[in-house]
Image (tube, rainbow, N blue to C red):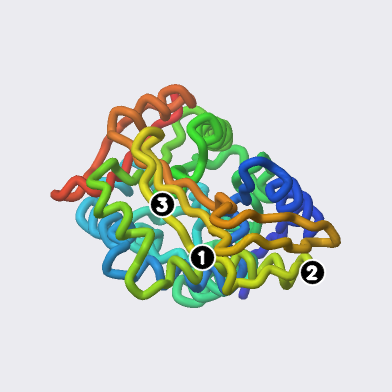
């Protein structure tokens, strides 16, 4: 498509192997949530966003629908618009008509899902110049296309910032601020602290889609790293840990067992877990302090009437 350029900076398989081996060798065992997003994992996550228990996506979309024009005015027109963790790009479509960016750059680690969603957007928006970048934005990387003189703005939806431990979240925000430059704007979705019941339900849906999403990580490891995980001997375990203020997702071993991954053996005791994801929840004040520590100032905050979710406009100082 003439209006779409695709850059494949997907991390090599060796990085996946090293991270998984390191994570399974640690005490406690842990694997980064960025590895959920192979093609099937990305599709499962799209299903999660439509579940009745998963309030985050529909609430964020409702906030954007209600305040999108104001958000667009703050971000500014004719910019290079970055989207971190773009997924299926559903939310940005609500803003693109108002934003009218010179260039839209979705960045996501899920290669085929990104390619597919970018192709759909390019077809429906033939006048929009799209530079899609498959990359791991959780680590430092160079943008393959970066017009220096063009103003920069960024969109980081879905409360994905909550997947990072606070010091790593601060570091990611600092890198984003550097990319945007002085005066650059960031529109970011942030999930709020709320009742434990609502939070636990969102990550333990009645249809079991989140469980399938979590277990698909083991399927991916089996396929790509020649492992022999028996999925029937692991179970999804997710709960709100109030002290650090985060949802934790784990894969819990139902039995004592040994598993081979890339030629190495790992033992599991009964009920031992692999920690696969954190999702930190914030108060407005907590997140604003985090943003300030990373070089931003808070320009505007929007919330839904039930105070479930927030969208922040931040400006690089």
Which callout, 1 or 3, points at the residue further toward the start of the chain?
3
The reply to whether the C-beta atoms of the residues labelled 1 and 2 are less than 8 Å apart is no
Residue 189: x and y in percent read: 36, 47
Q: Residue furthest left?
A: 305
Classify residue 110 by image quadrant: bottom right
| First-in-chain label (1 vs 2) | 2
Label 3 sits on a secondary structure element that is loop
Query: Which residue in the protein does label 3 denote?
Result: 157
Alpha-carbon distance for marks 2 and 3? 34 Å
* Position of residue 302 in the picture relative to residue 276 (left or right): left
Residue 93 percent coordinates (x, y):
38, 64
Residue contact between numbered discs 1 and 3, judged by CB atoms under 8 Å: no
x and y, in percent, of residue 202 in the image:
33, 59
Name the residue tied to disc 2.
226
Q: Quick one: 267 or 38, which is closer to the camera?
A: 267
Residue 3 position by quadrant? bottom right
What residue sits 29% from the left and 43% below the top?
A: 192
The disc, 2 or 3, on the residue closer to the chain's N-terminal end is 3
Instruction: Work out which residue is located at the far right of the displayed protein and give it.
Output: 263
Q: Nearer the viewer, residue 159 or 246?
A: 246
Locate residue 127 relative to residue 310 in the image: left or right. Answer: right
Per the model, the C-alpha gap separating discs 1 and 2 is 21 Å
What residue is shown with label 1?
A: 235
């Amino acid at each position: 498509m003439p209006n779409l350029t695709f850059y494949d900076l997907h991390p090599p398989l060796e990085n996946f192997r090293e991270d998984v081996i390191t994570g399974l060798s640690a005490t406690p065992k842990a694997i980064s949530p960025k590895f959920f997003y192979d093609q099937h994992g990305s599709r499962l996550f799209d299903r999660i966003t439509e579940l009745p228990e998963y309030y985050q996506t529909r609430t964020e979309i409702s906030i954007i629908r209600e305040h999108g024009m104001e958000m667009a005015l703050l971000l500014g027109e004719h910019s290079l618009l970055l989207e971190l963790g773009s997924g299926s790009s559903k939310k940005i479509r609500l803003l693109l008509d108002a934003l009218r960016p010179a260039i839209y750059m979705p960045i996501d680690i899920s290669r085929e899902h990104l390619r597919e969603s970018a192709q759909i957007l390019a077809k429906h928006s033939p006048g929009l110049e799209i530079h899609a970048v498959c990359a791991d934005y959780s680590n430092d990387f160079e943008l393959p296309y970066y017009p220096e003189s063009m103003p920069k703005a960024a969109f980081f939806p879905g409360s994905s910032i909550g997947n990072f431990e606070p010091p790593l979240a601060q570091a990611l925000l600092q890198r984003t601020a550097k990319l945007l430059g002085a005066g650059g704007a960031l529109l970011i979705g942030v999930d709020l602290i709320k009742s434990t019941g609502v939070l636990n339900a969102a990550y333990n849906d009645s249809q079991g889609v989140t469980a399938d999403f979590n277990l698909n990580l083991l399927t991916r490891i089996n396929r790509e790293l020649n492992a022999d995980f028996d999925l029937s001997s692991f179970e999804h375990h997710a709960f709100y840990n109030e002290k650090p203020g985060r949802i934790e997702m784990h894969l819990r071993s139902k039995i004592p067992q040994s598993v081979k991954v890339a030629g190495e053996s790992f033992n599991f005791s009964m009920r031992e877990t692999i920690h696969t994801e954190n999702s930190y929840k914030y108060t407005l004040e907590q997140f604003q302090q985090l943003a300030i520590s990373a070089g931003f100032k808070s320009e505007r905050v929007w919330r839904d009437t039930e105070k479930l979710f927030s969208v922040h406009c931040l400006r690089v100082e």
